[in-house]
Amino acid sequence: MPVRPLASTSVRASDRFARRRERRERIVRWSLATLVVIAVGGGIYACFFSPWLSVRAIVVEGTQVLDSELLLAHIHAARDQRTWGYARDHYMIPARPERIAQSLEAEFPILESVTTDKRFPHTIAFSVRERTPVAQWCEGAACQLTDASGARWDALENTLPHDLPVVRDMRNGVRWPQSDATILYTISTIRPQLRAMRIEPLTWDLPETALPELRVSVAGESELRFSLEDDVQKQMTVLAVFLRDTPSTVSAYMYLDMRIPGRVYVKKKAQ
């Protein structure tokens, strides 16, 4: 009877052991891969689809003139927009509230800025800053509010601030080197000075002239004329000296013209 070689037996046993080990390793790898897929899929679901991180509250802060309900209606309409059927702004992590903030600034010019804050787990806040009107700016019959930067917007019903200067822009497309913001700054500077001199400005007119000038209609049907090319503050000083040295009041004149440096040209009303 032939004797079976021991080496052959040990080789077969080694092969069986190697196959079993390879099978176990394959099972472990597949198990780990499955766990990773489940973990990643669960993470994606939790981030993008789970009600655990859904947006449940929208907060608008900082409104003074605007109705917060009006802004909320715009926000909800914007966040309901879908991409491939998916409303990303309904979930905290993929939501892009800054996109909605930009649309608010475009839709409501009274808003100077809108900032956003994700307050986990379920709230997104919109903090708004409204512009502060410094004047009414009128072109023809159309009037808007304007702030110190020159930005303009339509006044909301029953929200027109009291005691704002009225600028009447009659230039009809003629543009001067001075920006609207510079003109508004000039008005805000000399207005309280005129009132301190007991002169009440009614309107601030920008006429259709090649040379920049400011004409101020004041109580008593009189007019003050200033050059915007020269230092208006110096012209105010000349006016103050003139009124101090003359017995007549401003209402006695049709106009007082300070456009020539150091001088006041006047035209008296007919007696």
Image: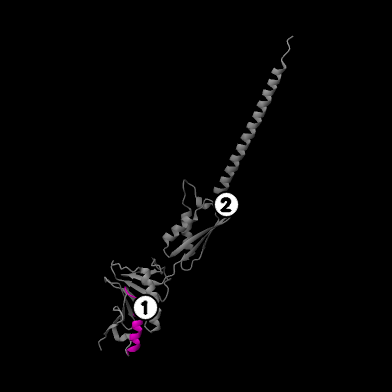
Foreground residue, 99 or 266? 266
Magenta span has 240?
yes
Seen in the image, is 228 located left or right of residue 158?
A: left
* Image position, residue 141 (x, y; %): 32, 70
Residue 186: x and y in percent read 37, 74
Residue beneath the point at 68% across and 26% down: 17
Is tag 2's residue or tag 1's residue first in the polypeptide sequence? 2
Q: Report the Cα–Cα distance between label 2 and label 1.
A: 60 Å
Snapshot colouring: one colour
- Report the residue marked by disc 1: 233
Q: How many marks?
A: 2
User: Where is 193 relative to 82, above or below?
Assistant: below
Q: Are marks 2 and 1 in contact (CB under 8 Å)?
A: no
Tell me the SS state at disc 1.
Answer: helix
Q: Quadrant of the N terminus?
A: top right
Secondary structure at badge 2 equals helix
Dot label at residue 106: none
Q: What stretch is highlighted in magenta?
A: 229-246
Q: Is residue 206 above or below residue 116?
A: below
Q: Name the mark nearer the viewer: 2 or 1.
A: 1
The residue at the far bottom in this view is: 247
Q: Mark 2 points at which residue?
A: 53
Residue drawn at (36%, 71%) of the image: 183
Image vertical order of residue 70 relative to residue 250, above or below: above
- Residue 260 lies in the magenta-colored region: no
Predominant secondary structure, magenta span: helix
Q: Which amino acid does label 2 sit on?
A: Leu
The spot of residue 211 in percent (x, y) is 28, 72
**The disc labelled 1 sits on which kind of residue?**
Gln
**Quarter occupied by the C terminus:** bottom left
Q: How crowded is mark 1: few (under 14 residues within 10 Å), some or many (20 or more)?
A: some
Along the line of sight, the residue nearer the viewer: 233 or 58: 233
